[in-house]
Image (spheres, helix red, strand yellow):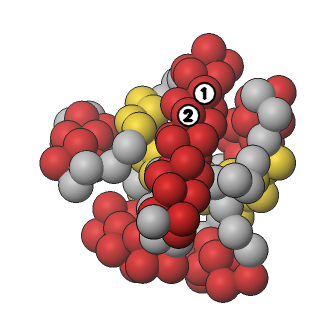
Amino acid sequence: MSRRVLILEDSRTQAIIISKMFQRAGYEAICVVDQADALAQLRTQSFGLLVLDVFIEARNTLDDLEVYREMAPQVPIAIMTAGQIDNPDAGATALNKARRARVNFLLPKPFFYDDVKQVCEDVDAFWTRNGAENSLSAAG
C-alpha cells in the first residue's frame, strides 16, 4: 500500500497546512492546485488516498468523481470543503452530494490533525484488508 496522498487544493496556504497534517500522520503528501495537475499525477504515480477539495476554480470536483475513480480504482477518496463565500449553503450541499456519491471520507473545513489521523488509520486498515483479500483471491 502506498502511504502517499494526493491533495487537490487551490489555496496554497491551505495545501501546506493540510499536507503537513498528513505528513505528521506518516503519509507523503503531493499537492496540486487544479484538476489537470491532479490527473497528471494520477497518470504517473500511485496513491493510497485522494483528498479532493470540492470547489476548484470554476469547477465542482464532485462532477468529476468518476474520472478519479477510473484513474485510481479502489483508492479511498476524501472530500473537503468550506463552501463558497457567496453561497452559505454550498458546503453542506456539497458534503451531502459527496456522501450520496459514496465517497469514503468527508472533511468539512476547518478540520484538525485528529481528523486526518483518523482518516489515515481507516485508510491503512482498508489497504491492510484489501491486500489480504487480494492475496487470498490470488492464491485461490
Residue ID at (57%, 58%):
135
For mark 1, does the 10 Å Cα neighbourhood hold few (<14), some (14 to 19), or many (20 or more) residues? few
Residue under label 2: 125
Which amino acid type corresponds to the residue marked 1 in the rendered image? Answer: Glu
Which of the 4 image quadrants contains residue 85? top left
Q: Does the residue at mark 1 contact the one at mark 2 (Cβ under 8 Å)?
A: yes
Q: Position of residue 109 (x, y in %)?
A: 48, 30
Position of residue 8 relative to residue 138, above or below, is above
Residue ID at (81%, 34%):
26
Q: Position of residue 6 (x, y in %)?
A: 66, 58
Observer-nearest of 39 and 124: 124
Position of residue 41 relative to residue 110, above or below, is below
Q: Position of residue 83 (x, y in %)?
A: 37, 41
Residue under label 1: 121
- Tell me, yes or no, if residue 119 can be seen here: no
Give the spatial CA distance, label 1 vs label 2: 6 Å
